[in-house]
Amino acid sequence: MFPKKYIVLNMNFIKNKKNNRGVILLLTLFILSGILVVTLVAADLVLAGIKMNRLTGYSNLAFFASEAGMERALWEARKNPSFSLPGTSQDNIFQNLDIGNGSAYQVNYATSTPYITFTSIGNYHGAKRSVESTYEVQ
């Protein structure tokens, strides 16, 4: 019916098909490994964004703490007649005062006649921000 040549070719095709089964498994592993790598990179980017967002919030709270320290120093200098600055030209007047929400501030001052400069440093979970104010004494 069929020539012998056709039967021999058909048998070779069947043998080659059996040998290709391992290639499909290897190709599947490569595709799944690629998907895993892409997923891990995407997860790393998302976690970095979340961490950056948290640090921005910490920075804002540190800034508000430094503003509170500055307001207190200016109030003390303006309204309290018994308030006196320490004797040196640069000193800490309020150190590590806790505001109550986990943030704290420290106020330093420097004098250069006739100017006084207050520097307030706010701290919240390792994030630090500072503000500075200079005024002239009359």
Image (cartoon, grey):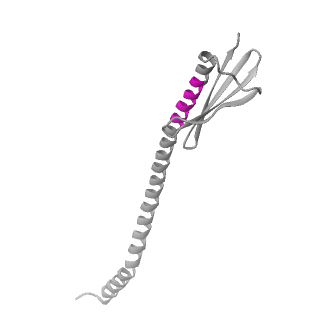
Residue 36 placement, left or right of 4: right
Q: Residue at x 58, y 43 (%)?
A: 126
Between 108 and 59, the one lying in front of the other is 108
Q: Residue furthest top?
A: 138
**In the image, residue 72 above or below residue 50:** above
Among the 4 quarters of the image, the one containing residue 108: top right
Q: Quadrant of the N terminus?
A: bottom left
Among the 4 quarters of the image, the one containing residue 70: top right
Q: Residue furthest front?
A: 82
Magenta stretch, main secondary structure, is helix
The answer to whether residue 84 is visible is yes
The image shows residue 4 at horizontal and vertical percentages of: 31, 90
Q: Is residue 66 in the magenta section?
A: yes
Magenta region: which residues?
Answer: 59-72
**How many numbered badges does the structure rendering display?**
0
The image shows residue 125 at horizontal and vertical percentages of: 54, 43
Residue 8 placement, left or right of 134: left
Q: Quadrant of the C terminus?
A: top right
Between 114 and 42, the one lying in front of the other is 114
Residue 74 placement, left or right of 3: right
The image shows residue 133 at horizontal and vertical percentages of: 64, 21
The answer to whether residue 20 is visible is no
Between 25 and 116, the one lying in front of the other is 116
Among the 4 quarters of the image, the one containing residue 3: bottom left
Q: Residue at x 61, y 18 (%)?
A: 80
Residue 124 placement, left or right of 16: right
Q: Is residue 136 in the magenta section?
A: no
Q: Residue at x 63, y 19 (%)?
A: 77
**In the image, residue 82 above or below residue 105:** above
Q: Residue furthest left?
A: 1
Q: Residue at x 70, y 20 (%)?
A: 116
